[in-house]
Image: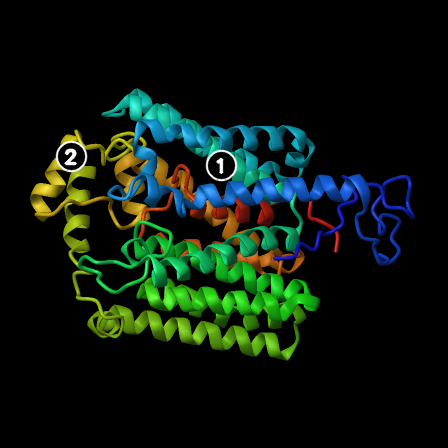
Amino acid sequence: MPVTPAYEADDYKHPARPDGQRPDADGRPPREEAPLTGPALVIFRIEFALAAFCVFMFSEALWAPLFAPNQENGGEMSWMRLLWLPVYGLTLLMSALRADRFLRILPALGMGAALIALCYASGWWSINPEVTSRRSLALAFTVLFGLYLGARFKGRDLTQIVGGTFAVLAVGSILAALFYPSMGVHHDINAGAWRGLWHEKNQMAALMTFGFVACCASGFGIPERRKLWFGAAALIFFLILMSRSKTSLLACLLALAAMPVLSALRRGGVRSVLFVWGAATLSLIGGAVFFLMPEVIFKALGKDPTLTGRTEIWESLLRLSDQRPWLGYGYKAFWGPDSIPNQIVKKETHWDVPSAHNGWLDLLVQLGWVGVILFGACLAATIFCALFRFARVKDGYFSVLSLSIFTFLILSESFILGQNNLIWVMFVCAMARLTANRMEAA
């Protein structure tokens, strides 16, 4: 994908303004910016490429299935942890070089630090302190990269990094499904569903949802390449359909429905009132139907009322969480192979449970109600800012839609506080942009 850099006055001197001030700093309307040239453009492209490489690594596309085809989390293999060292090194280096940018996102910096501190502290009461300590360190670098993305790149630069990376991965996933089906297509209980360059179809679909939104946002933000970006979005949407992941498909459809609503709200007037009224009415109707007739919703989604046995997992987890209600069993310690609570869940449900399949419950058994309340406060603060500041974040609604998708996905998947996980990176990035104490100029 061609890169269209957004001018950033704090990094590079504008030819017409040798003092380096923003064009609208004196209160006059901003004038047209000259494109970056020379060393400034080279530096930008290098940093852009390094950030895209890190996004690719955090996505775990291609390299994890190739090196650990029988293991859903390649990072579990000790020798594969070495693959993360370059990513952590680049994250630390780029964050250090742009340390001044973190002054713009102090609220997100504080919330991220609080979450990491709780995960580290849980090592004191963890049932597996070694795992908790190691994965807390990985989480710290994951959060740092998300903060770096949100602090460093302006709107369309950020959407191009994410959208461009996923456009390439979408092409690779289609090629894998067509010409290397042993890797690109499921041959187990989900036979026929595409999984592309990932271990599992739901993993690919959930990540591609963010790529879809990023490509749409790039299309809105870069009119001269709108057809190219919308074409990439259509390609990604096709992959989500082929994955047969109804949760991710629903998330994409909700994002599509939210785009005109957000656009109308930004413009204001009678149209915004009508959109808000319509959205609120549909939400209330949908909530009432789900509450009164949940079997209708499950049947429409092709799911059984037990959500493929997930309700049994949740009942077992709730019983175990009652034994450690406030602090839990330690960050990432509950699902270890030698964990006694994990063995109890497997025995009660009669299958090898990999996770809670619900982010909130997974957080509850790991960090107890303290962790749930702390993360809930961070999420609530971000949502509150999104409601009142989304129009000022110039990224084609990418941040607010990423937040919405993340909030929806954690109802069925365990993405909260995910170490080396791109979906958690996207949430931290959205949190940084939406809660920033210094908003970027128009």
Badge 2 local density, few (<14 within 10 Å), some, or many (20+)? many
Residue at left 40%, top 37%? Answer: 419
Q: Secondary structure at mark 1?
A: helix
> Mark 1 — residue?
143
Residue at the image point whose x is 8% and y is 47% from the top: 350
State the image coordinates of residue 408 (x, y, percent, origin top left).
39, 58
Of callouts 1 and 2, which one flags the residue occurring earlier in the amino acid sequence?
1
Q: Position of residue 159 (x, y in %)?
A: 59, 55
Residue type of the residue flagged with mark 1: Val
Question: Seen in the image, is 69 located left or right of residue 86?
Answer: left
- Left or right placement of residue 318 versus residue 166 in this view: left
In-front residue for pair 413/105: 413
Residue 365 screen position, x and y as percent: 25, 38
Would residue 311 be seen by someone viewing this image from the given angle?
Answer: yes
Disc 2 target residue: 341
Mark 1 vs mark 2, CA separation in Å: 28 Å
At label 2, which amino acid type do we have? Answer: Pro
